[in-house]
Amino acid sequence: MPAKRRSKSATPTSVKPDTDVSSPNKKLKAELNGDGSSPISLSPKMAAQTQTPTQTRKVKAELDDDDEETAARFVKPHIPDNEARERWPLRYQGKKKKVAGAKNSRDDSVDVVQALHHYSVAEVDNIVYNLFDDAHVKAEDGEDDYICRIVEMFEAVDGQLYFTAQWYYRAKDTVVKDHAHLINDKRVFFSEVRDDNPLDCLVRKLNIARIPLTMATDKKKKRLPVCDFHCDMLYLLPYSTFVKLPASEKRIGSDTSSTISSEVDTNGACEVNSEIGDVTQAQQRCKPDITLLDLYSGCGAMSTGLCLGANLSGVNLVTKWAVDLNQYACESVKFNHPETEVRNEMAEDFLSLLKEWEVLCKYFSLVKSKEPQQKYIDLFANDDEEEEEEEEEDEKSEDDGEVFEVEKVLAICYGDPNETKKRGLFLKVRWKGYGPDEDTWEPIEGLSNCKEKLKDFVTSGYNSKSLPLPGDVDVICGGPPCQGISGFNRFRNTENPLEDEKNKQLVVYMDLVEYLRPKYVLMENVVDIVKFANGFLGRYALGRLISMNYQVRMGMMAAGAYGLPQFRMRMFMWGAQPTEKLPQYPLPSHDVVVRGVIPTEFEMNVVAYDERHTDIQLEQKLLLEDAISDLPAIANSERRDEMPYDQPPKTEFQRLIRSPREERFDSSKKLKPAMHELYDHRPLELNTDDYQRVCQIPKRKGANFRDLPGVRVRPDNKVEWDPDVKRVYLESGKPLVPDYAMSFVNGSSSKPFARLWWDETVPTVVTRAEPHNQAITHPEQDRVLTIRENARLQGFPDYYKLHGPVKERYIQVGNAVAVPVARALGYSLGMAFQGFAADAPVFSLPKKFPNILEKHSSASSEEVA
């Protein structure tokens, strides 16, 4: 809450608007494992830190209309007592009453000051204030005055005069902080945060224009000069949420109503009822189509999950375009999503290409334009004249050499496809009389005499939407790489991370969003984006989206909470145009072992049940055995990319993950064992030395290099050489226990050559399969986990085939978004697209999600019978 104005009768304790407001406490049930990790149920949420409430200053009541020297007073008459008691019942309990903390308050309970009378008009320093006026409130010396709406005026039973402020936030006082420069300095954000203040804290009245978030920029500029500030969004601290102002606000200002129209508490969960959560057969048959662009797609896990989840909600989400720099990842996407236009290029080149493509479409009159496209007018100006001259020259120069003629334009790109260090717009052409092997990339400037060929290509691409134009994309998803924040980077820029080239892709991602203006945005990243440099990059992403007038919220989700045997916490940021419903976060469906630390400021962003939900029954956490125990036993030297299953599924997880692709999208088909081969069930083959080491690791829980001869564990849990045991050497002459294993983490780690066990979960699936410093060895087989076993831990369906060398496939899986998390988010997206999303930031998934289609299929079969 804002600091109070210095009263004539008391000295205040100041607290800034962004520092003492939060949602009700959310706690996590925790018990300590033997390894020091905390298995925590995400049914409730961690308690937010409680700050000391601001001390209240007192102003003696002065109600004499003729007393001109009074600095602060109420203007008679007061609001009738019976009306006041009806509107503010908690103020008339006879004594201070402790009640549950208000929305967005960190306090579990607050003392309610008891009132003698309520008023609708006050005068402070000869300025008259009416109920629901906007005003400045005095801040500490040297700081900007705070901004509020007056929602209550009352005289306390002890004679003190108060007003209740509902606060506005400047951008710098929100989670955006240092990126406030991205947002107009006259733009403020309304909140649901209220507190009581002495009446004489008021400084002056303000004119704050309430502007619809959908208002065009030119109209908005016309209104700005006539107001002190303008407001078009509501700021809520839970999940760092910015949403459009509600269409109608309740201006009652009572205890029993919020000034924000909402059917549910902004901190609570919205239960999905049978009318919304259950998807009928009719909905499945009449699904609306929406298009998706997957940026930094990797092998396509995020878009795959989103499409699966949206389908379950009754929406046909189609990955129309995918972009990634990794060639093998693009091959994986193309194989599994043959309908997708996959582009293997840098995101910044893709953006440049889209801009050039739009100009070409305007030049060929495919897109309306008020301005002539002079660049291409000049380029093709002499095309007609040159065609006539060419006929004459051909007759004269038959002996001059071979003449090349463009038969067809095949493709387009922006960059340097010929590796000549000359970047620009290039087109791939097929030469008349030559085959595909002679196709070449030509700069567009060299095709000035091929206007008609180019027109045919652009027209065909425009009609098929091979490249998106602004307005063509419904959803953009992606996780821009930010290697600059990695803990493995010793040279991280903590002062301004955006100056680090390794973080520039976040800027490119936002530039693409700003250019294409999709209806929805979903950005994924590691949790370090809110940890590193005080969350610099996460705040930047929020600021960019808000500056584009997107509604936004940011949450952190653990993969294991959605039915996987790994923890893997990731950040997901939603954005939605003002015309759309902002998607919610799906609450956990499974218990999970929680690892890692969340910054205190962002504890409220962890997607979890509120502590008030004491009756939540989560599914049991999944273990390694649940995920991979049905897969065939193989050797370290296995090299087959495809093989048959050798036993039926043992668990519900295995049954679902084996189901064929078509059954994931067609509820009329009953789930049955997979008919396809098992893909990618092969490990990274260990070298001879590592294989011999792994063979000597006992096949039991907790086994690792410490069980090898010659290693002794000290009382402080660090390893040392056993002086009584002679060092053992391998056939190659290298030691059985390598020095790096003994020195890893100063000898305190048990990870080198550690076996996983059936009743465990893994912290996170990684991109490398070497056993030197991580637990990745199979419980009972002498090898590391296979590509497919890692893919199972990430929730990839078994039908999803990966491409590239073995190491590249491990990288694709390790870099992927966990498919079940993306599936749950896709369901949320589909509900929002159909207008079913509530105002709450979170909601509960349907029971037995994602098997809801099977449930309906079975019910329909019973009805027919």
Image (cartoon, helix red, strand yellow):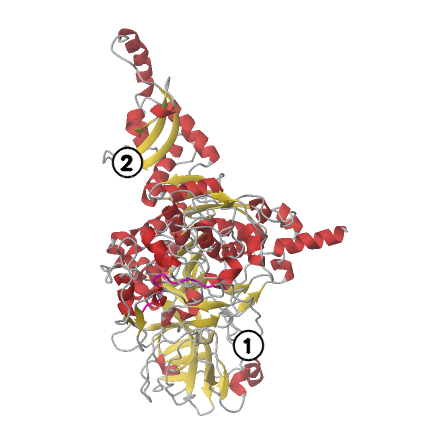
Question: Is residue 828 visible in the rendered structure shown here?
Answer: yes
Q: Residue furthest right?
A: 865
User: Considering the numbered disc 1 on the image, is that residue within a helix, a strand or a loop?
Assistant: loop
Residue carrying label 1: 256
Range drawn in magenta:
748-757
Residue at 62% x, 63% y: name it: 273
Residue type at numbered disc 1: Thr
Residue at 59% x, 61% y: name it: 846
- Give above or below for 383 relative to 576: above
Question: Is residue 236 visible in the rendered structure shown here?
Answer: no
Magenta: main secondary structure: loop
Q: Find residue 760 and report its horizontal and vertical position in percent.
A: 47, 65
Q: Find residue 471 and report its horizontal and vertical position in percent.
A: 45, 44
Residue carrying label 2: 416
Q: Nearer the viewer, mark 2 or mark 1?
A: 2
Tag 1 or tag 2, which sits nearer the N-term? 1
Q: In front: 437, or 447?
A: 437
Residue type at numbered disc 2: Asp
